[in-house]
Image (tube, rainbow, N blue to C red):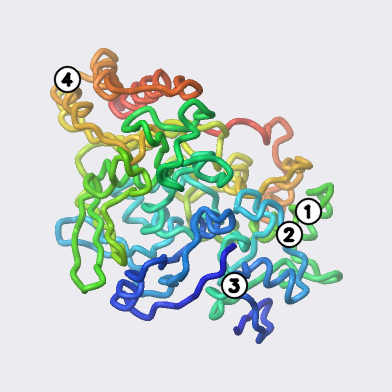
Amino acid sequence: MHFTINGQSHDIEVDVRTSLLDLCREHLGLTGSKKGCDHGQCGACTMLVNGRRVNSCLTLAVMHQDDEITTIEGLGQPGNLHPLQDAFVRHDGFQCGYCTPGQICSAVGMMDEVKKGWPSHVTEDLGAAELTVEEISERMSGNLCRCAAYPNIVDAIREVAGLGDRNPNEDVGKEVAA
Amino acid sequence: MKLFDYARADSVATAARDGAVPGARFIAGGTNLLDLMKLQVETPETLIDISRLPLTAIEEREDGGLTIGALVPNSDLAADPRVIERYPVLSRALLAGASGQLRNKASTGGNLLQRTRCYYFYDPATPCNKREPGSGCSAIGGENRILAILGTSDQCIATHPSDMAVAMRALEAVIVTQKPDGDRRRIAIGDFYRLPGATPEIENVLEPGELITHVELPAAPEGRQTYRKVRDRASYAFALVSVAGIVAVEGGRITAAHLAFGGLGPMPWRNEAVEAALVGQEPTDAAFHAAADALLANARGFGSNDFKIPLTRRTLVATLRELTQEG
């Protein structure tokens, strides 16, 4: 099978059952993407496929032979961090760090969706949205952080979006409309 | 995961033909099927990858509606300007479901065919008539908080999990298919799903190899549209109760109502008696409660899901207030 991951070509034979996540982690040494639940519930495995964020645990590698795959390793490297990686470090957007590669890949995909004008569940008129705390919380809900670094993740994303820190009186954990 | 053969389909015709072989399953987004294959709830012998078929367009119809390719991702459908403008109930339902990552992968056709999230269906260590016909239902007398109160049988009380399909039921969508012999058919969404009865493993009217190619939306009905979803957490959770509503009011009276419900039954639920209870009435709480009476006349709780009966009433009344308030 032939794959293009972080701009590099790979020709490799793998079992047809191999998920895109296991291809990267177990066969190509790209262990940045993490396996949390392996059922699409936690988001730790999030990668970009042709620029769109997906759960790499819930898709087969064999189905992605013609796609451009980007993992956290492709976004930035030590000394050459992606702006979101840099912002996560400065804002303390993690404790254990296990969910972080997925959070960052998801945030890259999410910010692109916002640029395209995609609404979310909390976008009042289904129009274009600004990245308020409520919008970020909703759009990032597919990425769990058991250390609960959510407020700092929100700050990191807001900084990269050019919006500055959240209002300290705004509660990140507040209920969005059911 | 059990081993399977993999084949990428190069046309709708070959996909439908190869899909008719016993043990074959289509895979598009795979977000539900692969999850179930990991648990060996699904054990296909062959996966036919349809994800590269040219079924990704959303096109105008002469009647003012839209034809949606079966492989249009949920995220693209929700963000399509024509859907947002003419079918906001559908955009809102899609955006209320799953996560950003899953919506990017999940297809229109696959969403219609999602399997239930009943805890026991997912747990091969327990009896489940849907997973293993004749083995029994663990949910009746078990943990059934998220399960059905309408359309159940003694064999199964599973709910259909989709939000998208609820909006499509309110919009009277038509599901277009192609059969292995090349015949195409158009199936009204109201005729697409089957009640569990004694065969809960059969969930819809599709025949072996029959492939969903498109979903047609007729021109949007008159009226204001909304989708209200009640769930256990604020985002990324299945519905306990949801309502897709389209209601028109003229001269102080309700002139048309289209209502469909999620989280209540084995299919996106619609009951025309609910709509009949509203049309011609003034939009008052008395009329809204009469509609709820019609919806819940045959509702039955199974213990831990009893709360859904009053919750459904309140959710329907709140939805109708929202859709009929002035201004």
Left or right of A73 on screen, residue A21? left
Check disc 1 and report its element: helix, strand or loop.
Answer: loop
Q: Which x, y percent locates residue B95? A: 46, 47
Q: Is the C-beta separation of discs 2 and 3 under 8 Å?
A: no
- Residue picked out by circle 4: B281
Residue at the spot x=44%, y=34% of the render?
A: B229
Specify the amino acid type for callout 2.
Lys
Q: Chain of mark 1?
A: A
Q: Chain of mark 2?
A: A
Q: Which residue is mark 1?
A: A98
* Residue type for callout 4: Gln
Determine which residue is flagged by label 2.
Answer: A34
Q: Quadrant of residue A55?
A: bottom right
Q: Is residue B162 visible?
A: no
User: Disc 1 or disc 3, which is closer to the eye?
Assistant: 3
Residue B190 at x, y percent in the picture = 23, 44
Asked if the residue at tag 4 contacts the one at tag 1, i.e. Cβ–Cβ closer than 8 Å, the answer is no
Q: State yes or no: discs 1 and 2 in contact (Cβ < 8 Å).
A: yes
Q: Say which of B29 and A138 sits in front.
A: B29
- Whether residues under marks 4 and 2 lie with C-beta atoms below 8 angstroms apart, the answer is no
Label 3 belongs to which residue?
A: A61
Query: What whole-number distance in Å separates the C-alpha atoms at marks 1 and 2?
Result: 7 Å
The crowd level at tag 3 (other Cα within 10 Å; few <14, some 14-19, many 20+) is many
